[in-house]
Image (cartoon, rainbow, N blue to C red):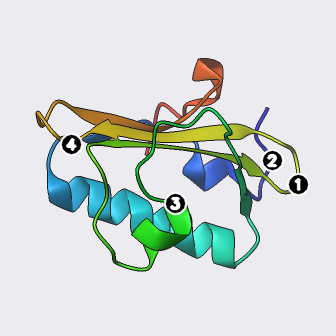
Amino acid sequence: MPCEKCADLCVRYPIRQPNDLLKAIKIAKQNVEDGTIIELPDLESINQNSFATVASGEAWGDIVEYNFCCSNCSERFSLHAETYHGSGGYWEPKNKSSVRENL
């Protein structure tokens, strides 16, 4: 269950175009910087660039896949998108039951 600290992040935000991905990266970056979420390292990641690199404004790769967790309750979040073919992706909680119905 999400806590008050991360409840606002418990949305399924569709990424359909580059501006959507840019917005999701910006929001994730802000929440990492303020300590709401922590990036989870993934040794098996297929990312071409680190989240820090992408969040600083450098280009993202063909596949974007980063995982985070709430620093308070450990709710997990995923930011993933396929950019090469433009099929998009989502920012979303890993636990589908945590998705807020009303934004």
Crowding at dot 2, Cα within 10 Å, few <14 / some 14-19 / many 20+, comes out as few
**Mark 2 belongs to which amino acid?**
Cys
| Cα gap from disc 3 to disc 4, whole angstroms | 15 Å
| Mark 3 element type | loop
Residue 13 in sight here: no
Q: Which of marks 1 and 2 is in front?
A: 1
Q: Which residue is drawn at 26% across and 43% down?
A: 62
Q: Nearer the viewer, mark 4 or mark 1?
A: 4
| Cα gap from disc 1 to disc 3, whole angstroms | 24 Å
Position of residue 48 measured from the top left corner of the image (x, y, whole percent): 40, 50
Residue 3 shown left or right of residue 83 in the figure: right
- Pointers 1 and 2 in contact (C-beta within 8 Å): yes
| Cα gap from disc 4 to disc 1, whole angstroms | 31 Å
Q: Which of marks 3 and 2 is nearer the N terminus?
A: 2
Residue with the most extreme top position: 97
Work out which quarter of the rendered image holds the N terminus and state it. top right
Q: Nearer the viewer, mark 4 or mark 2?
A: 4
Q: Nearer the viewer, mark 1 or mark 3?
A: 3
Q: Name the residue under label 1.
A: 72
Q: Earlier in the sequence, mark 4 or mark 1?
A: 1
Q: Name the residue under label 2.
A: 3
Q: Mark 3 points at which residue?
A: 50
Q: Earlier in the sequence, mark 1 or mark 3?
A: 3
| Mark 1 element type | loop
